[in-house]
Image (cartoon, rainbow, N blue to C red):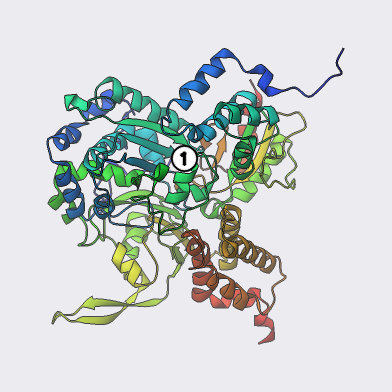
């Protein structure tokens, strides 16, 4: 099992993972109620729906699935009183390499998700919701289905929730092994029973033309869980845990070459890379030095450990000044990572030490993207396969001088030229690995021998 | 007497299967088509694969044409038109698992299960490489979302974590005993 620190590291503040890590904590209703479960739903049902949306906005909750869109803003796109059916689809397709948090919520604390979902549905006047769970989590699907039955039988879901007259039906929908379904419009196509080809935006923004062409909210599992805690703690206290644009806690998944991989729930912006890797995760393996970090799931641009980044910070006189900052001292919140050209994404942090070959690592990711491209857009379908074939050939000793330049050119011609963000997701690794570790790609291309 | 023909899965649909299928369809009050993937899961879990009669049966049940179902079977890697081994071992191929030695682990699984480690497998409805005795299939799959306990494999419904190459033979041995 993914290890959890016990007791939590001092840098951690467990909200989402507070209960589910406790020994003996079961995914049933009785256990959930014994831990204060559904009290936030009761409270939310006494509020005006618009107050709930305002609270989520004020909490500065950003989506935890990867894109990081402000959750309250997303909800605000739904006009509660437009007379149309609205839907919520919970994205439990967790497939971004490096990310493994939702699996634990779904398996161990399904009622936390259902409580957040009922609050979200009440706030957006939604009567039907689906929880899309990747089929590689078969136990999770059964556990969540069982939790739905328990919640219905006890008035937390179904007809007239807690006697308020508010109805909500929830069903589990299983995926079938395709990464692309994590993209929100692809997920909707999949839920409609079709090949999951992403829809083009505009006009198909889910909040306007979503599931069955009706206004739809698509939120990640963890994001929906946070809603419960915004109600429980109050928006102001929740927001205070994070940074001004990135409220609350974030469950960071750390994997790769650290002594103590695992999930650490940390207030947004509360740790630097140095603190996360060398303190929270217990440092590297003996005798190793840090080489590279992918900070937010495999699609996030890789960072080089010995690089000095330039960031803009507020100086003592209040004016913005540019400052040199070693990679390890960068704070891991959404806006800081964005300002250094990468992203917090799904907070899946993959750590690589000096034993790792960057051509090998990129090739692994290129094969992933080549396997997972849905094939709808030519630049992505062809380009992801070309990049994968090239890095595979380079690894096998068949590198050519022009390979790095060609890789760069292919990646540059995918990003921005596709219907969905998979185009960026598959080109950012190639672009960033080549930019940060050019010497390794030149060597694999055979340039080292000739120069 | 008719000559021996290929068994037709749809001839073996039971009343209990039918009832379960109808219950699944009822979860999608807005569009029956939404039940396509759930019915494919139900079918494959029941019959082990989805043959032509399965595709036709599901399509008819949902008022679709067979190609609406076939195009799902050929797109989604989970579905297959041919039977796999009784135990399907899906080893994670992606970065964190690969860094932790998943290539070795997969090779060891192939060795212990009697599956050709070099057999090509590209999805699109084919069965994953399977042992001659039909007991095991072994394949690489993409990220199983358990990178913190790499390397991992999904063995039928169960996730096995932190697999050492030296553990593999005994894992497979246990799976062989009924």
**Left or right of A242, for residue A430:** right
Q: Relative to A140, does residue A186 appear above or below in the rendering?
A: below
In the image, residue B53 lies at what x, y percent?
Answer: 68, 27
Residue A413 image position (x, y, % from top left): 55, 72
Task: Tell me the residue that label 1 is attached to.
Answer: A191
Is residue B95 or residue B172 the one in the foreground? B95
A313 with respect to A173 (left or right)? left
Residue B55, quarter of the rendered image? top right
Neighbourhood count class around disc 1 (C-alpha, 10 Å): few under 14, some 14–19, many 20 upward: many
Residue A297 or A23: which is nearer the viewer?
A297
Q: Residue at x 47, y 57 (%)?
A: A257
**Left of A401 or right of it: where is A227?**
left
Q: Residue at x 49, y 74 (%)?
A: A436
Q: Is residue A142 above or below residue A180?
A: above
Instruction: Work out whether residue B158 can be spotted.
Output: no
Determine the chain carrying the residue at label 1.
A
Residue drawn at (56%, 67%), measured in percent from left and top?
A358
In this rendering, position of residue A342 left or right of residue B168: left
Residue placed most toward the observer, A107 or A4: A107
In depth, the one of A203 and A163 nearer the eye is A203
Q: Quadrant of residue A93?
A: top left
Q: Which quarter shows the N terminus of chain A?
A: top left
């Amino acid at each position: 099992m993914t290890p959890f620190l016990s007791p939590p590291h001092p840098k951690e503040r467990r909200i989402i993972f507070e209960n589910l890590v406790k020994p003996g904590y079961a995914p049933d209703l009785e256990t959930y109620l014994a831990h204060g479960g559904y009290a936030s739903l009761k409270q939310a049902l006494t509020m005006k729906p618009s107050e709930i949306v305002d609270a989520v906005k004020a909490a500065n909750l950003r989506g935890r699935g990867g894109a990081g869109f402000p959750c309250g803003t997303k909800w605000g796109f739904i006009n509660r009183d437009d007379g149309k059916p609205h839907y919520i689809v919970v994205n439990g397709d967790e497939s971004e390499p490096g990310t493994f948090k939702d699996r634990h919520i779904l398996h161990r604390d399904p009622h936390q998700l259902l409580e957040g979902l009922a609050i979200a549905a009440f706030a957006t006047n939604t009567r039907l919701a689906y929880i899309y769970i990747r089929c590689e989590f078969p136990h999770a699907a059964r556990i969540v289905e069982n939790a739905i039955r328990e919640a219905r039988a006890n008035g937390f879901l179904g007809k007239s929730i807690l006697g308020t007259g508010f109805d909500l039906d929830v069903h589990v929908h299983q995926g079938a092994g395709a990464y692309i379904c994590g993209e929100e419009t692809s997920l909707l196509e999949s839920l409609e029973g079709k090949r999951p080809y992403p829809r083009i935006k505009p006009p198909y923004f889910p909040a306007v033309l979503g599931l069955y062409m009706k206004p739809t909210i698509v939120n990640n599992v963890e994001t929906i869980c946070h809603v419960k805690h915004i109600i429980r703690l109050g928006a102001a206290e929740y927001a205070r845990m994070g940074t001004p644009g990135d409220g609350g806690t974030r469950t960071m998944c750390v994997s790769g070459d650290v002594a103590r991989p695992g999930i650490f729930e940390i207030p947004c912006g509360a740790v630097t890379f140095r603190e996360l890797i060398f303190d929270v995760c217990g440092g590297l393996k003996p005798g190793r030095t840090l080489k590279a970090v992918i900070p937010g799931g495999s699609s996030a641009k890789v960072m080089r450990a010995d690089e000095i980044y330039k960031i803009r910070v507020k100086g003592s006189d209040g004016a913005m000044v540019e400052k040199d900052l070693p990679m390890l001292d960068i704070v891991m919140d959404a806006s800081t990572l964005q300002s250094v050209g990468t992203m917090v994404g799904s907070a899946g942090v993959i750590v690589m030490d000096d034993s790792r070959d960057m051509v090998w690592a990129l090739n692994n990711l290129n094969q992933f993207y080549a396997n997972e491209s849905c094939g709808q857009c030519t630049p992505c379908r062809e380009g992801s396969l070309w990049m994968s074939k090239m890095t595979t050939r380079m690894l096998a000793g068949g590198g050519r001088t022009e390979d790095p330049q060609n890789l760069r050119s292919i990646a540059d011609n995918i990003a921005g030229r596709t219907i969905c963000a998979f185009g960026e997701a598959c080109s950012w690794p190639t672009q960033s690995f080549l930019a940060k570790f050019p010497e390794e790609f030149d060597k694999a291309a055979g340039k080292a021998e000739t120069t | 007497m008719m000559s021996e023909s290929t068994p037709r899965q749809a001839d073996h649909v039971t009343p209990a299967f039918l009832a379960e299928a109808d219950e699944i369809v009822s979860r999608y009050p807005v569009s029956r088509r939404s039940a396509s993937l759930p019915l494919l899961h139900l079918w494959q879990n029941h019959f082990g694969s989805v043959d032509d009669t399965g595709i036709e049966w599901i399509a008819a049940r949902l008022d679709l044409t067979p190609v609406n179902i076939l195009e799902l079977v050929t797109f989604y890697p989970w579905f297959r038109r041919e039977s796999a081994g009784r135990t399907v071992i899906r080893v994670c191929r992606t970065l964190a698992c690969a860094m932790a030695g998943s290539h070795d682990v997969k090779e060891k699984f192939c060795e212990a299960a009697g599956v050709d480690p070099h057999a090509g497998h590209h999805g699109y409805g084919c069965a994953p490489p399977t042992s001659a005795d039909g007991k095991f299939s072994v394949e690489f799959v993409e990220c199983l979302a358990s990178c913190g306990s790499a390397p991992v494999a999904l063995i039928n419904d169960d996730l096995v974590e932190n697999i050492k190459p030296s553990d593999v033979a005994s894992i497979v041995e246990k799976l062989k005993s009924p």
